[in-house]
Amino acid sequence: MTKPLYEVADVINRYGDKFLAEYGASVSSEQRRVLTNIVACRTTALGGHVDSCDTCDHVEISYNSCRDRHCPRCLGSAAADWLEDRQAELLPVPYFHVVFTLPGALRAVALQNKRIVYGILFRAVSETLLEIAADPKHLGARIGFLSILHTWGQNLLDHPHVHCIIPGGGLSPDREKWISCRKDFFLPVLVLSRLFRGKFLAFLREAFDGNKLSFHGSLESLREPKSFEALLAPLYRKGWVVYAKPPFGGPDQVLKYLARYTHRTAFSSNRLLSIDGGKIKFRWKDYEQGGRRRTMTLDAVEFIRRFLLHVLPRGFVRIRYYGLFANRHRAENLELCRNLLEEAGSTPPPLPSDDVTQRLPDGATDQPAADEDRRTCPRCHAGRLRLLTILKPFQIFIPKPKTVGADST
């Protein structure tokens, strides 16, 4: 992938002090850590190592990554490793993509209570899918699925929603057979929407009654039960957005979707167009206009503020497995599903093409190549790169002068 003209780190380097002067009092420790990590990523601040070719005089300096999950630079290798592990978990069935979205009226509450509200969002989504799928009127099976939390929209404003990647079927209650859903239909969206709404609001009220929610600033009035009930009451009458996309065509498409939705940050550096004059110009898709590609210009301080809206609480898990794929019994259940599908005549999925696992997710600026390729000298393509020295943080490495007659290119 071509290196972006600008990086999110460039924006923070140039305008971070101005942002902190304006919003520093309200910036959390997690958000400060993210700012620091993104700026330090792959610079002398984190140290690195120096490799030299054992055939020619090529010397290569590599700086360490910050490994922060909010850093656009650090997604490539993590996504590749994660996707490689997911290949072995694919079943020879259609897969469906279902999205559950939090209503706009609750987004401010979510921002002030990320750990609680996003946890409730995961719980409501998982219980809704498992309950409806287990109902004999719909599928009558125990399903398994992967859920991924996103908190952003293309304009960088808060837009919490959960993506679910779901095989088209599940195990019968007695675990004796695989029950397939219809070829082009998984579960009724309207039924999912209504149950999701009811569960989420019930869990949120439970959190309120248990004094687990905090309200500050413009939301301070919600501490009063009457005000909180007034917020929730209209939401019972509105339809909540649940969107089911058409089924995937095969394992390649499943992995492409996983690459797109799992290891991703709120903003991809390759969307940046300019960062001058205190203004940040970037590309975005306007989904209210059918996904029309447009450009947006924000004040640099506002851009950083929006970017930091999507910093998750430390330790919060944003990729989760449910049902048959719950971590404890995943391998056992996958083996049973494969055996039952094989008995029913389903063939194993073909191995995904190589380009799928090498595809970068949106937001990643580069990705290390395979170890064998990375250790081959990029200049002579014959020698091997060998570790020459370790660079400590902030250490400056100055190569020794070349011998007379050496290649000076």
Image: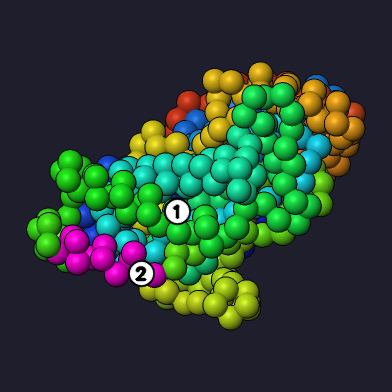
Is the residue 68 above or below the residue 31 in the image? above
Checking the image for residue 237, the label placed there is 2
Q: Is 63 or 182 nearer to us in this picture? A: 182
Quadrant where the C terminus sits is: top right
Under tag 2, what secondary structure? loop
How does the figure colour the protein chain or chains?
rainbow
Is the residue 294 above or below the residue 54 in the image? below
Residue 56 location in percent, x, y? 83, 29
Q: Is residue 1 visible?
A: no
Q: Residue at x 24, y 44 (%)?
A: 207
Q: Is 180 or 157 nearer to us in this picture? A: 180
Q: Is residue 127 left or right of residue 170?
A: left
Under tag 1, what secondary structure? helix
Residue 102 counted in the magenta span: no
Q: How many marks?
A: 2
Q: Is 199 or 264 nearer to us in this picture? A: 199
Stretch in magenta: 227-238
Specify the principal SS of the magenta part.
helix
Is the residue 348 above or below the residue 332 in the image? below
Marks 1 and 2, Cα distance to the nearest angstrom? Answer: 13 Å
Give the amino acid at mark 2: Arg
Residue 360 location in percent, x, y? 69, 48
Q: Is residue 96 left or right of residue 297?
A: right
- Find the residue positioned furthest to the front: 137
The tag earlier along the polypeptide, 1 or 2, is: 1
Q: Which residue is under mark 1? A: 195
Q: Residue at x 59, y 65 (%)?
A: 271
Q: Residue at x 62, y 77 (%)?
A: 290
Residue 288 location in percent, x, y? 54, 77
Give the amino acid at mark 1: Leu
Q: Is 106 or 67 nearer to us in this picture? A: 106
Residue 63 location in percent, x, y? 56, 35
